[in-house]
Amino acid sequence: MEHYSVEQKIQDFLAIIEAKNPNEPEFLQAVKEVAVSVIPFISSKKEYQGKKLLERMAEPERIIIFRVPWVDDSGEIQVNRGFRIQMNSAIGPYKGGIRFHPSVNLSVLKFLAFEQVFKNSLTTLPMGGGKGGADFDPSGKSDMEVMRFCQAFMTELCKHIGPETDVPAGDIGVGSREIGYLFGQYKKIRNEFSGVLTGKGLAYGGSLIRPEATGYGVVYFAEQMLKTIGRKIDGKIAAVSGFGNVAWGVIKKLDQLGAKVVTISGPDGYVYDKEGISGEKVDFLLELRASGNNRAEDYTKKYPNAEFHAGKRPWEVKCDIAFPCATQNELDLEDAKALVSNGVMCVCEAANMPSTLEAINYLLDNKVLFSPGKASNAGGVATSGLEMTQNSIRLNWTSEEVDARLKEIMIGIHRVCRDYGKEEDGYVNYVKGANIAGFVKVAEAMLAQGIV
Ligand code: NDP
Ligand code: 2IT
């Protein structure tokens, strides 16, 4: 055994995960990224050895898959597939978003639930990890179709969640409208008004700043990263992808802090606005998203000085700081090379796993400041945690109070990532730092609770 190298341990571990989870490329990608950082750490700690901690973390505690039948506006019956992955409850009730998108499948939700466990641990709040969703495509659906779908989805999901068990929230395709319909149906069936969901409207238990929180948190994190090299957000050129909830929050805060945001993107291509997306243009992003067209190109109808690049990603534009805010694997090796050759200093992930493993390794090798989503986008779920606290104490905090707590949490996450991720030459590997720091709290709780 003494010649059993760490490299070999990683290979053997991944071979088992791969055999157990065939046809799940996104899940394997997420596990691999964590294993490469965490297995060497486990090997260096006697108390963690032989406990199968990572093996246990990579196996969901429970997966619920269910039929979601509903009737569309033309009277036709539609059948979708619903999921909830209850990944790990060692440090608190399962917590994580719900995604409605045609690309949703078991692999995508398992990768998201796995990431969520580490992310929630990093927030320091008592939240386990989970994720759910459906292969429902909200684009082009009427408001009443979305309502009927949400009701059908919750009719089954409500048997498996609760404020002390599992607390879902929004994600791609699930915003305040959907959370409202989901909450209404839960309350009707369970006859219980509780903090079972976060991202709720202000009138029924929501928290101020939750809509902005993911994006604001990302920029607070980027501020801390830049500070380590003596730089500021002010005056920087920023490239952003997506134009959804997270992209909006990122752009709003970057604009406030004096950066010039020059891109947004959608599934159709990207927009380059050399004058900068600021002021009323930031508010227009909300309208653009609410239109349900999913076309970034529509921005140029309102602001004709901006250019649209069909079928392309924004990473070819020269920028100082880059924020992928759309979806998984939207920044690959070629994109990473383009960013580096254009002199990017910081790539801060806002979406979940937007960069491929090859892209991450290239950015790390080139000593770019790079932060994984599980660290830099944790402000969304952290503020969900603050919403749960306000629901429990039956009080509402002011925007200033929530924002101050969010900022403090992001600074704390940055600090632990730096502490665990600092390399001999002083470069901070935030991927390693986030994985190890996120792992430790969950591991300690699991060890204390026995083999369950
Ligand atoms: P939104 O639904 O508001 O926006 C998502 C954007 O990404 C849309 O423009 C969407 O367009 C686009 N998109 C989605 N899937 C694809 C795809 N396969 N290819 C190209 N574009 C795509 O979602 P959010 O802003 O909430 O989420 C964005 C990212 O941030 C996701 O990775 C999410 O998991 C992550 N995140 C969200 C948090 C939150 O609090 N909301 C918290 C932390 C992370 P379209 O619908 O047309 O595909
Ligand atoms: O990916 C995420 O962290 C989210 N979609 C937010 C989850 C939450 O429970 O607020």
Image (cartoon, rainbow, N blue to C red):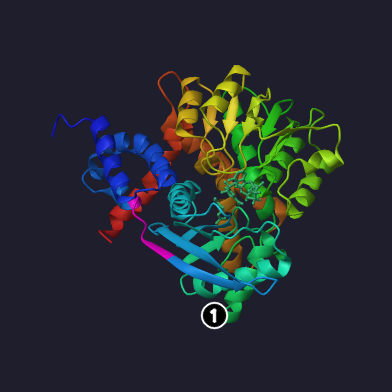
Identify the residue at horizontal 70%, vertical 72% (top origin).
74
Q: Is residue 163 visible?
A: no
Magenta part of the protein: which range? 57-64
Quadrant showing the N terminus? top left
Of 13 and 260, nearer the camera is 13
Does the segment drawn in magenta span residue 63?
Answer: yes
Does the segment drawn in magenta span residue 157?
Answer: no
Identify the residue at horizontal 85%, vertical 38% (top origin).
303
Identify the residue at horizontal 61%, vertical 37% (top origin).
324
Residue 137 placed where, x, y %? 62, 58
- Name the element at disc 1: helix
Residue 30 placed where, x, y %? 42, 42
Q: Is residue 306 above or below residue 120?
A: above
Q: Is residue 391 above or below residue 43?
A: below
Q: Which residue is mark 1?
A: 190
Of 369 and 63, nearer the camera is 63
Residue 420 placed where, x, y %? 41, 33
